[in-house]
């Protein structure tokens, strides 16, 4: 049990990568609070007492602050935060609307700032030596077609993680980012269902397969635990080799 006695907050933990992290953290002994747009999932019932769900839209400070207050009231403090809630719409650059741009920045980047700052304040107040993990993407490091708003939000997120790492080190708080490649979730289901498209896409991945949410969860346990105690400000790529491939 690598997270025994720890309390963790995970945004966007109802589905996909966040759900896999919530389950893995619980298996490793952590108490888990999920903040999401919807939290009435049946699978959470079997973790009664160990897992709580709070409805929260991360783009609104009032909702974030209220949710974090509820978590600390219930669990006492927060040791680990995985800031994972995010959206990605595929749209050619010339067609991206102002609303779509603002939506991506508000959820993926501003939401990460709001949650990150509120959690960090809570950690400093309670003297916790915490670990904060941002869910970034390989798209924060390289530009992919039809995702300019998403790419920009994740690029900003990597610098947010580094900035927080620099300023929070003196408070014994580590801040890192995970940068997954193509992972099978609701977010990517339409692309996976496109048989011809996915066959072509897999050619860009040296390991020739998509990743699984559980493979990101394993990295999250490492980042959350003392095993990564001298790591901060790091962007860890988990992508089957996609980013290092020249052609
Ligand atoms: N799937 C991939 O290939 C992939 C690759 C790299 C990075 N990521 C990142 O991983 C994270 C999770 O993605 P996923 O693939 O699991 O997606 P998903 O759509 O399966 O799950 C996203 C979760 O976030 C929640 N959410 C969305 N907007 C929210 C908001 N405003 N407030 C609170 N919760 C909100 C959703 O309700 C959902 O539970 C995202 O930040 C995404 O950018 C995903």
Image (tube, rainbow, N blue to C red):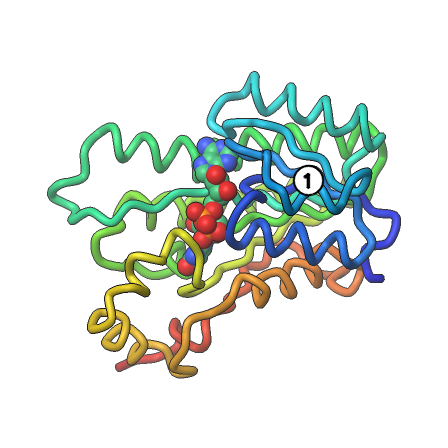
x and y percentages locating residue 71 in the rendered image? 74, 29
x and y percentages locating residue 97 in the rendered image? 18, 33
Residue 158 in view in this figure: no
**Frontmost residue, 27 versus 203:** 27
x and y percentages locating residue 69 in the rendered image? 72, 22
| Badge 1 density bin: few <14, some 14–19, many ≥20, Cα 10 Å | many
**Quarter of the rendering containing residue 164:** top right
Image mark count: 1
Q: Residue at the far left: name it.
A: 94
Q: Residue at the far right: name it.
A: 5
At 22% from the left and 58% from the top, the residue drawn is: 145
At 35% from the left and 58% from the top, the residue drawn is: 189
At 20% from the left and 47% from the top, the residue drawn is: 91
- Name the residue tied to disc 1: 9
Q: Quadrant of the N terminus?
A: bottom right
**Frontmost residue, 76 versus 154:** 76
**Frontmost residue, 174 versus 34:** 34
x and y percentages locating residue 115 in the rendered image? 59, 32
Q: Is residue 238 left or right of residue 195?
A: right
Whether label 1 lies within 8 Å of ligand 1 gets the answer: no
Q: Is residue 222 left or right of residue 214?
A: right
Residue 215 in view in this figure: yes
Q: Is residue 153 left or right of residue 246?
A: right
Q: Quadrant of the C terminus?
A: bottom left
**Frontmost residue, 207 versus 214:** 214
Q: Is residue 51 left or right of residue 220?
A: right
């Amino acid at each position: 049990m690598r997270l025994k006695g720890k309390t963790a907050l995970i945004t966007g933990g109802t589905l996909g990568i966040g759900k896999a992290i919530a389950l893995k953290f619980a298996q490793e002994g952590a108490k888990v609070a999920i903040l999401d747009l919807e939290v009435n999932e049946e699978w959470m019932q079997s973790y009664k007492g160990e897992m709580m769900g709070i409805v929260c839209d991360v783009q609104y400070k009032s909702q974030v602050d209220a949710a974090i207050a509820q978590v600390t009231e219930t669990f006492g403090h927060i040791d680990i935060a995985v800031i994972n809630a995010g959206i990605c719409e595929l749209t050619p650059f010339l067609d991206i609307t102002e609303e779509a741009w603002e939506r991506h920045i508000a959820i993926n980047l501003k939401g990460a700032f709001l949650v990150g700052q509120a959690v960090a304040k809570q950690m400093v107040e309670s003297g916790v030596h915490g670990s904060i993990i941002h869910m970034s993407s390989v798209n924060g490091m390289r530009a992919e077609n039809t995702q300019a708003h998403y790419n920009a939000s994740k690029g900003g997120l990597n610098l947010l993680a580094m900035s927080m790492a620099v300023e929070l080190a003196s408070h014994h708080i580590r801040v890192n980012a995970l940068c997954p490649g193509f992972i099978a979730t609701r977010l990517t289901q339409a692309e996976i269902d496109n048989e011809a498209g996915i066959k072509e896409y897999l050619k860009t991945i040296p390991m020739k397969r998509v990743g699984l949410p559980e493979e990101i969860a394993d990295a999250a346990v490492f980042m959350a635990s003392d095993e990564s105690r001298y790591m901060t400000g790091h962007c860890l790529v988990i992508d089957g080799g996609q980013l290092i491939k020249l052609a």
